Image: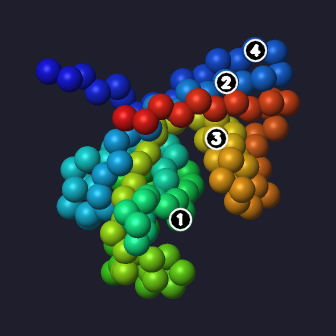
C-alpha cells in the first residue's frame, strides 16, 4: 500500500535565510462535492489551474486560506454559482476544466513568504504578496505529490 506524504510545509532557518519545503497535495479536479470530502478545513496555501487547449495545466490564481480554511476558499473560488461577484474568475471557471492543489501551513508569516516566492517565480505581481520581512532570503523547494 502506498503511503502519501501529508501536504504540509517544512521550514529550516539558517541565519537570515529560510528554506521551505512545500509538500503539495496531488492535483485534483475542482468539483464541489469532492472538495468537501478531500480538502481539510485548515489554514494553508492553494493554487488553482485550468487545462489549456493543449492539455497543459496553467496557473490562474493562488493565495492563502486563514480563518475560513482551505476547503472553504477552494470551494468558493471554483464554483461558478459562488463566483458571481468575481467576473474575471467566473470567466475561467465556467469555461475551463479546473484543478487545484494545496499545502497546509499554520503560520501566517510563513504563508506570506511562500506566496511571495510563488509570485516572484511565476513573474506575477509580487507587490500583492509581500514577504513577512523576517528573512533576507527565501528559498522554496516544491515536492509534487
Compared to residue 1, the image places residue 129 above or below, namely below
Q: Earlier in the sequence, mark 4 or mark 3?
A: 4
Picture quarter with the C terminus: top left
- Quick one: label 4, few (<14), some, or many (20+) residues within 10 Å? few
Q: Within 10 Å of the Cα at label 3, are there few (<14), some (14-19), or many (20+) other Cα atoms? A: many
The reply to whether the C-beta atoms of the residues labelled 2 and 1 are less than 8 Å apart is no
Distance from Cα at disc 2 to Cα at disc 4: 8 Å
Which residue matches tag 3?
A: 114
Work out how far the residue at label 2 is from the one at label 1, CA to CA, in angstroms: 25 Å
Q: Counting other residues with Cα less than 10 Å from the Cα at mark 2, is it few (<14), some (14-19), or many (20 or more)?
A: some
Q: Earlier in the sequence, mark 3 or mark 2?
A: 2
Give 119 or 42, whichever is nearer the viewer. 119
Residue 19: x %, y % from top left:
67, 24
- In the image, 60 versus 57, the foreground residue is 57
Disc number lying in front (4 or 1) = 1
Which residue is identified by label 1?
60
Residue at the (45%, 77%) spot, across then down: 92
**Disc 2 designates what residue?**
19
- Residue found at x 37% / y 80%: 95
Q: Secondary structure at mark 1?
A: strand
Report the residue marked by disc 4. 14
> Residue 36 location in percent, x, y?
25, 55
Q: Earlier in the sequence, mark 2 or mark 4?
A: 4
Residue 96 in which image quadrant: bottom left
Q: Are marks 2 and 4 in contact (CB under 8 Å)?
A: yes
Whether residue 6 can be seen here: yes
Counting labels gives 4
Q: Residue at x 36, y 29 (%)?
A: 6
In x, y percent, where is residue 15?
Answer: 81, 15
Work out whether 79 lies above or below 59: below
Say whether disc 4 or disc 1 marks the residue closer to the N-terminus. Answer: 4
Neighbours of disc 1 within 10 Å: few (<14), some (14-19), many (20+): few
Amino acid at each position: 500500500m502506498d503511503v502519501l506524504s501529508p501536504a504540509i510545509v517544512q521550514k529550516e532557518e539558517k541565519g537570515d535565510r529560510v528554506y521551505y519545503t512545500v509538500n503539495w497535495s496531488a492535483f485534483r479536479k475542482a468539483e464541489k462535492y469532492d472538495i468537501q470530502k478531500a480538502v481539510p478545513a485548515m489554514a494553508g496555501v492553494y493554487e488553482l489551474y485550468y487545462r489549456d487547449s493543449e492539455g497543459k495545466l496553467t496557473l490562474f490564481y493562488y493565495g492563502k486560506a486563514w480563518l475560513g480554511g482551505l476547503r472553504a476558499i477552494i470551494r468558493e473560488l471554483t464554483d461558478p454559482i459562488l463566483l458571481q461577484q468575481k467576473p474575471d474568475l467566473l470567466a475561467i471557471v465556467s469555461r475551463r476544466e479546473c484543478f487545484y492543489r494545496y499545502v497546509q501551513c499554520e503560520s501566517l508569516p510563513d504563508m506570506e513568504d511562500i506566496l511571495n516566492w510563488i509570485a516572484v517565480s511565476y513573474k506575477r505581481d509580487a507587490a500583492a504578496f509581500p514577504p513577512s520581512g523576517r528573512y533576507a532570503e527565501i528559498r522554496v523547494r516544491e515536492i509534487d505529490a
